[in-house]
Image (cartoon, rainbow, N blue to C red):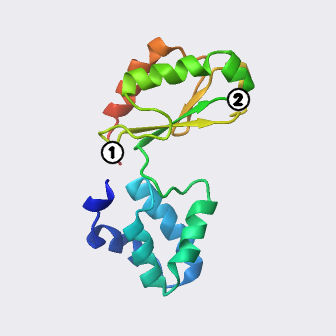
Amino acid sequence: MPEQNITYEDITPLLLKYPKDQRHALAIMQDMQRHFNYIPRKGLEALADYLGCHISGLYSMATFYKSLSLKPKGRHIIKVCDGTACHIRGAVNLVSGIERVLGISADEVTGDGEFSLELVNCLGSCALAPVMVVDDEYYGKVTTDRLPEIFDALRGEARP
Ligand code: FES
């Protein structure tokens, strides 16, 4: 959801699930991440207000934890491994295929908010190179002709 469409009515229920105690800051930010697919600026401001703390501390946490993002991400996060084995076995070609099928480059989100693309280091499944992970699902030896089918199936999944 773009920042301009997010209201405090969207954010408040996420805050109220927790007592006003700074030790819950991370859990609340994780809930925001799940809900919005990122931590909106308004979310950080509202959380700082709610917990009575300074926003800079929350900002540091949001940038420290890899599972949190201050930039919008897609509902489905595609990670393409660009480690050595995957690079040799076609990661570049795979990324080009994703760019063609979805119209996004690395670190971008599709216009419908469904997908974002990230390049990552070795995912620990080199025997399956080239490897792509979407959300928590691994796809090994991925060829570009499989991409439309994979993404269509994910697009069709119901929202939680
Ligand atoms: S290099 Fe891609 S999984 Fe190891």
User: Horizontal and vertical percent for residue 24?
Assistant: 55, 76
Q: Does the residue at mark 1 contact the one at mark 2 (Cβ under 8 Å)?
A: no
109 or 78, nearer to the observer: 109
Type of amino acid at the residue the image marks with label 2? Gly
**In which image quadrant can residue 66 be found?**
bottom right
Query: Which residue was labeled with disc 2?
Result: 83
In the displayed orientation, state which residue is furthest to the bottom: 52
Separation (CA) of disc 1 from disc 2: 32 Å
Residue at left offset 40%, top offset 63%: 40
Percent position of residue 7, x then y: 27, 68
Tell me the residue at 54%/57% (across/down): 68
Residue 11's disc is: none
Between residues 32 and 80, which one lies in front from this camera angle?
80
Q: What is the secondary structure assignment of the residue under circle 1?
A: loop
Relative to 113, does residue 26 appear above or below in the rendering?
Answer: below
Instruction: Indicate which disc residue 159 carries.
Output: 1
User: Residue at position x 44%, y 56% from top?
Assistant: 38
Disc nearest the viewer among 1 and 2:
2
> Which element is circle 2 on?
loop
Name the residue: 65% across, 29% down. 82
- Residue 96 visible to the viewer: yes
Under mark 1, the amino acid is: Arg
Residue nearest the viewer, comparing 63 with 17: 63
Judging depth in this view, the residue of 32 and 81 nearest the camera is: 81
Snapshot quadrant of residue 149: top left
Looking at the image, residue 62 lies above or below residue 126: below
State whether label 2 is within 8 Å of ligand 1.
yes
> Can you give x and y, in whole percent of width and height, for residue 49 in the image?
42, 83
Q: Quadrant of residue 44?
A: bottom left
On the image, the x and y values in percent for residue 53 come to: 52, 84
Nearest to N terminus: mark 1 or mark 2: 2
